[in-house]
Amino acid sequence: MITRDNLNEVVRLLTKKQVNKIVSTDKEYVYLDLFLTNSIASVSITCTNNFNKYNNLARETGNILFDTVDLRALLYLD
């Protein structure tokens, strides 16, 4: 589950390739999907214009749907 308490750590898990994709996308939203196991944490991203589908998915799974502009700002602050 992604919360405001672990959001910075989740953003730090993004690979350089994922960051480049976020920076260059023309999609409105980015869905961050956190995977946790006993020893590994990783994040997958999906760039999308489909707010309803991914907002519902985020609510069901505890992940997060970002406005792309807001996520870009967070990346540059970090």
Image: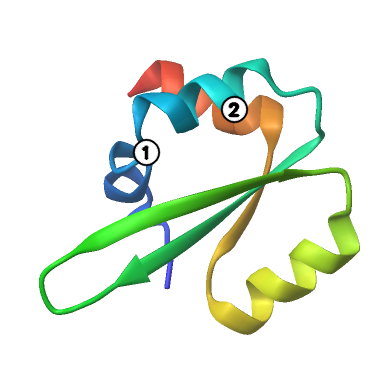
| Residue picked out by circle 2 | 22
Residue type highlighted by circle 2: Ile
Left or right of 78 on screen, residue 69: right
Q: Quadrant of the C terminus?
A: top left
What residue sits 86% from the left and 55% below the top?
51
Q: Please give the count of numbered marks on the rendered protein.
A: 2
What residue sits 18% from the left and 65% below the top?
40
Quarter occupied by residue 69:
top right
Tags 2 and 1 in contact by the CB under 8 Å rule? yes
Dot 2 or dot 1, earlier in sequence: 1
| Residue picked out by circle 1 | 14
Q: Residues within 10 Å of mark 1 (few under 14, many from 20)?
A: some
Quarter occupied by residue 73:
top right
> Which residue sits furthest left?
39
Quarter occupied by residue 43:
bottom left
In the rendering, which numbered label is found on residue 27? none
Q: What secondary structure is marked by label 1? A: loop
- Residue 60 versus residue 9 in the image, above or below: below
> Which residue sits furthest bottom?
60
Q: What secondary structure is marked by label 2? A: helix
Residue 28 horizontal/vertical position (percent)? 81, 35
Residue 53 horizontal/vertical position (percent)? 84, 67
Can the viewer see residue 5 in this picture?
Answer: no
What residue sits 35% from the left and 33% below the top?
15
Residue type highlighted by circle 1: Leu
Q: Quadrant of the N terminus?
A: bottom left
